[in-house]
Image (spheres, rainbow, N blue to C red):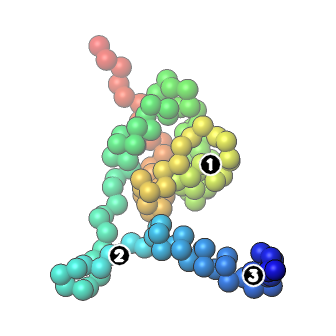
Amino acid sequence: MRTRSNLWPRSRPWPHLVLLSMAVVFTGCPDKKEQESPASGTATTAAPPRPPEELFSSLKCRNCHGEGSMFAAALVNARSKPDETVAMWILDAQKVRPGTGMPSFVGLMSTQEALSLARWIKAGNPVAAPAEP
């Protein structure tokens, strides 16, 4: 009688390669910035990166990092860190520090947008809104 170990001996890594290949096929490659145009068959570029102000607003960063909010000081602390470190944290904080309360923005912004947002934050933004009369 054949056992599972006889069917797929550990010396053959192909089952792992098949599973990995299937994962790539079904999830796609997140680093691809070009898509095939069905009409012309030529590559077209992705949408231009959004400005950091728009990202900060549309992704609701202000809820946690706006003036007077619980994590407003985190933006001040980020200003002394390298751009790439801040961008990595913005894009996927869970990868940097598992269990942190900051959500992942993978798929919601590109690496280029995260780097742009990091530079914007390091430049002293968001600027505090003037007090309402």
Residue 94's label in the rendered image is 1
Q: Which residue is mark 3?
A: 7
The answer to whether residue 39 is left or right of residue 79 is left
Q: Residue flagged by tag 1: what amino acid is it?
A: Gln
Q: Position of residue 3 (x, y in %)?
A: 80, 76
Q: Position of residue 62 (x, y in %)?
A: 43, 34
In the image, farthest residue toward the top: 133
Residue 23 is situated, as x and y percent measured from the top left of the image, at 54, 70
Numbered mark located on residue 129 in the image? none
| Gap between marks 1 and 3 measured at Cα | 38 Å
Seen at 75% across and 85% down, the residue is 12
- Front residue of 6/87: it is 6
Q: Is the N terminus in the top left, top right, bottom left or bottom right quadrant?
A: bottom right
125 or 18: nearer the eye?
Answer: 18
Q: Which mark is residue 34?
A: 2
Residue under the image location 49 percent in, 23 percent down? 68
- Tell me the CA gap for discs 2 and 3: 41 Å
Q: Nearer the viewer, residue 66 or 99?
A: 99
Q: Are marks 2 and 3 in contact (CB under 8 Å)?
A: no
Circle 2 SS class: strand
Pick out the residue farthest to the left.
Answer: 39
x then y, percent, for residue 57: 36, 40
At label 2, the amino acid type is Glu
Q: Residues within 10 Å of mark 1 (few under 14, many from 20)?
A: some
Picture layout, residue 110 above or below residue 101: below
3D distance between C-alphas at marks 2 and 1:
27 Å
The amino acid marked with disc number 3 is Leu
Mark 2 Cα within 10 Å, few/some/many (few <14, many 20+)? few
Q: Which label's residue is closer to the chain start, 2 or 1?
A: 2
Asked if residue 100 shows in the view, the reply is yes
| Left or right of 117 on screen, residue 57 | left
Residue 91 versus residue 9 in the image, above or below: above
